[in-house]
Amino acid sequence: MRADRLVATFLLMQSRGRVTAAELAADLGMSVATARRDLDALSAAGVPVYPQPGRGGGWQLVGGARTDLSGLTATEAQALFLLAGPAASSAPEVKSALRKLVRALPSTFRADAEAAADAVLIDSAAWGENDNEAPAVVRELQAAVVRRRKVRLGYRGRAGPASQRLIDPWGLVDKDDVWYLIAGTPKGRRTFRVDRIVEAVLTDQPAERPRDFQLGQAWQEVVAEMERRRSLIQATVLIDGRFVHVLQSHYGRHCEVLDALHDGRVRVRVASHMARSIAEQLAGWGDAVEVLEPDEVRGELARIGAELVRSYAR
């Protein structure tokens, strides 16, 4: 994960003071091009690293080699931990690195750094196929989580106009390239899709957050509920083995390979929240997919097929 490399890069620069991209690539087991991109990312995020051109040059921390990080500003410390925090939930070595970094920070920065490290979670398990960039509002919401400030949201649900809500931001999750905000509301904890937020205004009101709140644990509870809703209906289908990976990209973890037949086809189980949803996903496959069960999904496919015939038959 990229955040693991960024933390390792920063720590290496702390110990050596100046490094080249080639040295980083050799020490961390990556390409020189990747090392350059990571150094650029640290610099762009506000971490005080800069390149020195010419012979004997390389990348260096402002102020030279330090182990106490005393030259970091509060903003720079937050930037580093926002980069590193998402990896900590899945990489023990990053957790260890973060603990060391926190101890090395000036005491006045530690609370903000810890808040930044816990502001974002990356969940890499796929739910389906997405190719979305992080919405611009993510950075504003990160700042609200770290600073513990209430946010006034303009939020658009599945239907109807956007509504206004005053929420306590608790954490952000990047799930399969879709961002979610976990927040406190007058009705309790809620999860908002960030791409449905039409406006986010940071207020001066302090946000409340449960003392025992853990972003990773809260997200697992959200995932469990979403999984329950998304997998209420299951269908067993036959598909050419060459195309199983395509079906998996559409359904993510809701696609389970059961067994392979002698004719090259594979029996697969897919799931969704309703039979119509499965039928709509599979209709575009035509006769390349055969639905074996349940009859409810087969009936929905027949209905869709009849509608198409009525609309396009000559």
Image: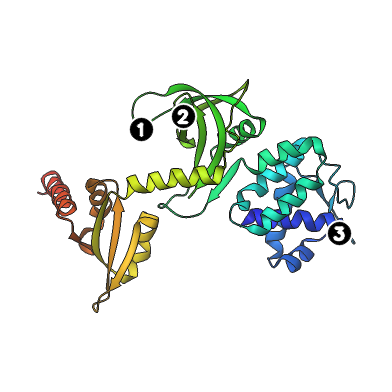
State the residue at coordinates (62%, 57%). Answer: 91
Confirm whether residue 133 shows in the render.
no
Q: Amino acid at mark 2?
A: Gly
Tell me the quarter of the picture where residue 18 sits: bottom right
Work out whether 10 lies above or below 264: above
Q: Badges 2 and 3: C-beta atoms under 8 Å apart?
A: no
Label whose residue precedes the other's in the sequence (1 or 3):
3
Along the line of sight, which residue is nearer the eye, 52 or 106?
A: 106
Which is more N-terminal, label 3 or label 2? Answer: 3
- The residue lying furthest to the bottom in this view is 262
Q: Secondary structure at mark 2?
A: strand
The secondary element bearing badge 3 is classed as: helix
Residue 114 appears left or right of 295 = right
220 left or right, relative to 252: right
Mark 2 → mark 3, Cα distance in angstroms: 48 Å
Q: Which residue is mark 1?
A: 158
Quarter of the image with the N terminus in it: bottom right
Q: In the image, what residue occupies the spot 83% across and 54% down?
A: 14
* Amino acid type shown at disc 3: Arg
Residue visible at 67% across and 40% down in the picture: 116
The answer to whether residue 62 is left or right of residue 255 is right
Element under label 1? loop
Tell me how far mark 1 sits from mark 3, CA to CA: 52 Å
Q: Which residue is mark 3?
A: 16
Separation (CA) of disc 1 from disc 2: 20 Å
Other-residue count near label 1 (Cα within 10 Å), few / some / many at <14 / 14–19 / ≥20: few
Q: Nearer the viewer, residue 152 or 187?
A: 187
* Residue 91 seen anywhere in this rendered image of the structure: yes
Q: What residue is disc 2 on?
A: 188
Residue occupying image coordinates x 75% and y 41%: 77
What residue type is disc 1 on? Arg
